């Protein structure tokens, strides 16, 4: 307990940064759950591909530590572009291959989970076997740097060296922390406005509220679902960039545990609820870090899940309730 | 067969299904067939049938693994298939069963196997009630994440608790007491034709450390008992209450089914069977550590149940065999196993959305729908 009090701000800032990543990934779960009522189990892989997109673009552009401010901004912007494009693309393909054929056949919801689990294995393994995949298409020489040691950790050169900006209660808040927290909140505000105000956002809410009535009102359901996956993927791409800036290491199976946590965050806040995902992500990140300070870091995940169970007991639909459809414009 | 409805003509033309043809056999033939099938299953590891036998790994051990998956799938089928509760943390109960055996027979006490296994079942069942009592009030997908969390909590507790051996686990778990009754020879195919090989034998119920065939026999016996139990429960009032709860919880509640209690019962029974399979696993392995109980295992268990056809006990057995056996059989594709498995899951989902062997109810429901459609058409034209 003394440890927590002494380093309170340190734990708070770390909790908020990891919470921001959870929140952004949780948005993908929440959006898909809102319109399709199913757990997109493969969303964690969408996130993982984003981390590689961010990593590869930095390698391609020759990013290295100690660049000038202009260079760093350029690299970060390119990371966002690459990761969002990569994750968005994977999410759209996922919907096309794993979900749409099932929807056409009116499959029971449980089988969609199996399809998603299968897709998740395939995506993760393709990344884990990327050296072989490159070999098949005869590109293993050109892509050597990108595909070697495909089962091991791949590290991002620390293009932003963490530098203290200001200090709170003895903890130096670094530029990376600030970028992650402020960036995540900004992105979520944009998404919130998109869902609230744009035409497509209205379509998403309509389908979430009542798919049949929405179809009768002229909403193209397939298109809305595709856009939902795309938006969820882009959010995961943003999360992947923040993750790479903060943690800096990724691997073909990096998505799994993070996905579980992000889904927990989505449920915590109320699945199907965008603001709930934001709140759930930050709460989960904070609770995990405070909990690990009190009972030891090896119990971090236990704290997260116990918290989830406790909250569901008191509020069975999460903190803010399920309401993608009910969000007012 | 006489059908009085208007679909009689089409029924006659349709070829009799496999099940109907088997049902029409005389009783004596049916019993004989069952006996032959049972003997075949027991002899399977010794027959060494080409192509079916796994090359790289000991076939007895592989069959034992398949048998534990079958047991797990039967248990999980009660929860997912009968009661319709999505449990993503089933590995937790499996781990609890295994660790109860480990703790009571090796780590902290030296109780006999015969005493320990029933205790393991009870402990797993109690843990099922403890987890279910607060969480079964939340519905659907929330339950999935809560159980997922439970599985992870169990694993992390195992990793972090010194009393349970932390990450090194528990070793030297004693073997079950055996009796050496007779030796069963195996069959050698190396010359191209089956030859009885009297040198390579398995002793009936001698639980050694090199020959896994007796463990497979033990598991088969347990599966038979669990199957019998499953059939009895499913066809009783309890089974119908589960079906009603799964189809429409509110309607069931209004009809006077105490849905919460039946869901809890399903959870407890499923947990007990999960604990039993964990106990068997610990017995055979002789050594357990938290790595044997990864979250991924829960996912595989769920895949076994859904791939086979949730709600149909024969279906989930097939599903368990698919999920446990094929990755072992195709070890030569070592690197691509998971990739191929993932592809297979996706294809199955698209082409067999009800599972390999859909539960009978769906077929029945489809016929009811067809009759309904005929009736409605008739009214419209009249």
Image (tube, coloured by chain):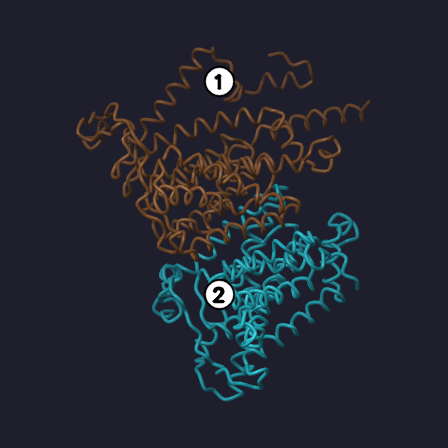
Chain colours: A cyan, B brown
Chain ID, mark 2: A
User: As displayed, is residue B220 above or below residue B274?
Assistant: above
Q: Which residue is mark 2?
A: A296
User: As displayed, is residue B208 above or below residue A76?
Assistant: above
Label 2 crowd bin: few (<14), some (14–19), many (20+), radius 10 Å: few
Which secondary structure, mark 1? helix
Q: Are marks 2 and 1 on the same chain?
A: no
Label 1 crowd bin: few (<14), some (14–19), many (20+), radius 10 Å: some
Q: Kindly give the residue lying farthest to the bottom in the view shown.
A: A68
- Residue B274 in percent (x, y) is at 47, 39
User: As displayed, is residue B76 above or below residue B295?
Assistant: above
Q: Is residue B251 left or right of residue A41?
A: right
If the image is split into quadrants, where does the C terminus of chain B sit?
top right
Task: Tell me the number on the disc at residue A200.
Answer: none
Tell me if label 2 and label 1 are in contact, CB under 8 Å: no
Q: Which residue is mark 1?
A: B22
Towards the viewer: B312 or A135: B312
Q: Kindly give the residue lying farthest to the front in the view shown.
A: B109
Residue at 55% across, 35% down: B78
- Residue B32 in percent (x, y) is at 40, 15
Which secondary structure, mark 2? loop
Residue at 57% across, 20% down: B14
């Amino acid at each position: 307990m003394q440890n927590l009090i002494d380093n309170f701000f340190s734990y708070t800032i770390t909790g908020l940064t990891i919470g921001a990543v959870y929140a952004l990934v949780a948005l993908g779960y929440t959006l898909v759950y809102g319109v399709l009522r199913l757990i997109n189990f493969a969303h964690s892989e969408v996130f993982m591909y984003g981390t590689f997109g961010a990593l590869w673009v930095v390698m391609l552009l020759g990013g290295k530590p100690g660049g000038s401010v202009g260079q760093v901004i350029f690299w970060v912007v390119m990371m966002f572009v690459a990761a969002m494009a990569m994750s968005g693309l994977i999410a759209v393909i996922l919907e096309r291959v794993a979900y749409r054929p099932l929807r056409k056949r009116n499959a029971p919801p449980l089988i969609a989970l199996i399809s998603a689990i299968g897709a998740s294995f395939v995506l993760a393994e393709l990344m884990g076997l990327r050296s072989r995949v490159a070999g098949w298409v005869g590109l293993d020489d050109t892509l050597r740097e990108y595909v070697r040691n495909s089962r091991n950790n791949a590290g991002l050169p620390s293009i932003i060296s963490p530098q203290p900006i200001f200090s709170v209660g003895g903890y130096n808040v670094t530029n990376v922390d600030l970028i992650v927290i402020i960036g995540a909140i900004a992105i979520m505000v944009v998404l919130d406005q998109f869902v609230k105000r744009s035409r497509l956002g209205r379509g998403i809410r309509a389908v979430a509220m009542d798919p049949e009535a929405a179809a009768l009102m002229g909403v193209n359901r397939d298109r809305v679902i595709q856009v939902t996956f795309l938006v969820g993927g882009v959010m995961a791409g943003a999360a992947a960039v923040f993750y790479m800036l903060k943690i800096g290491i990724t691997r073909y199976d990096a998505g799994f545990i993070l996905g579980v946590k992000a889904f927990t965050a989505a449920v915590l806040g109320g699945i199907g609820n965008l603001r709930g995902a934001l709140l759930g992500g930050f709460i989960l990140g904070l609770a995990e870090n405070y909990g690990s300070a009190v009972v030891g870091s090896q119990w971090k995940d236990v704290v997260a899940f116990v918290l989830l169970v406790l909250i569901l007991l008191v509020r069975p639909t999460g903190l803010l309730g399920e309401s993608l459809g009910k969000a007012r414009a | 067969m006489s059908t009085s409805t208007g679909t009689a003509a089409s029924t006659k033309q349709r070829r009799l299904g496999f099940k109907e043809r088997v049902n029409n056999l005389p009783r004596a033939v049916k019993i004989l067939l069952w006996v032959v099938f049972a003997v075949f299953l027991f002899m399977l590891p010794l027959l060494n049938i080409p192509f079916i036998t796994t090359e790289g790994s000991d076939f007895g051990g592989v069959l034992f693994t398949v048998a534990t998956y079958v047991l797990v799938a039967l248990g999980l089928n009660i929860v997912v298939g009968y009661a319709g509760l999505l449990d993503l943390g089933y590995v937790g109960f499996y781990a609890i069963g295994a660790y109860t055996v480990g703790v009571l027979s090796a780590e902290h006490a030296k109780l006999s196997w015969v005493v320990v296994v029933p205790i393991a079942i009870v402990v797993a069942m109690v843990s099922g009630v403890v987890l279910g009592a607060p969480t079964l009030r939340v519905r659907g997908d929330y339950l999935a994440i809560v159980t997922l969390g439970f599985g992870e909590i169990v694993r992390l507790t195992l990793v972090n608790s010194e009393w349970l051996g932390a990450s090194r686990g528990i070793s030297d778990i004693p073997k079950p007491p055996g009796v050496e009754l007779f030796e069963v020879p195996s069959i050698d195919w190396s010359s191209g034709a089956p030859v009885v090989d009297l040198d390579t034998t398995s002793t009936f119920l001698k639980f050694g450390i090199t020959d896994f065939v007796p463990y497979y026999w033990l598991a088969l016996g347990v599966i038979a008992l669990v199957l019998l139990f499953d059939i009895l429960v499913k066809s009783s009032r309890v089974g119908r209450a589960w079906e009603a709860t799964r189809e429409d919880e509110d309607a069931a509640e209004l009809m006077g089914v105490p849905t919460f209690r039946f869901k809890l019962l399903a959870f407890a029974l499923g947990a007990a069977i999960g604990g039993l399979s964990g106990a068997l696993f610990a017995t055979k392995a002789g050594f357990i550590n938290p790595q044997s109980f990864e979250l991924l295992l829960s996912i595989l268990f769920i895949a076994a149940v859904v791939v086979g056809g949730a709600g149909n006990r024969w279906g989930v057995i097939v599903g368990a065999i698919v999920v446990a056996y094929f990755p072992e059989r195709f070890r030569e594709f070592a690197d691509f196993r998971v990739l191929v498995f993932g592809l297979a899951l996706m294809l199955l989902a698209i082409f067999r959305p009800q599972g390999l062997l859909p539960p009978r109810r769906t077929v029945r429901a489809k016929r009811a729908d067809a009759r309904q459609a005929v009736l409605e058409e008739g009214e419209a034209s009249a």
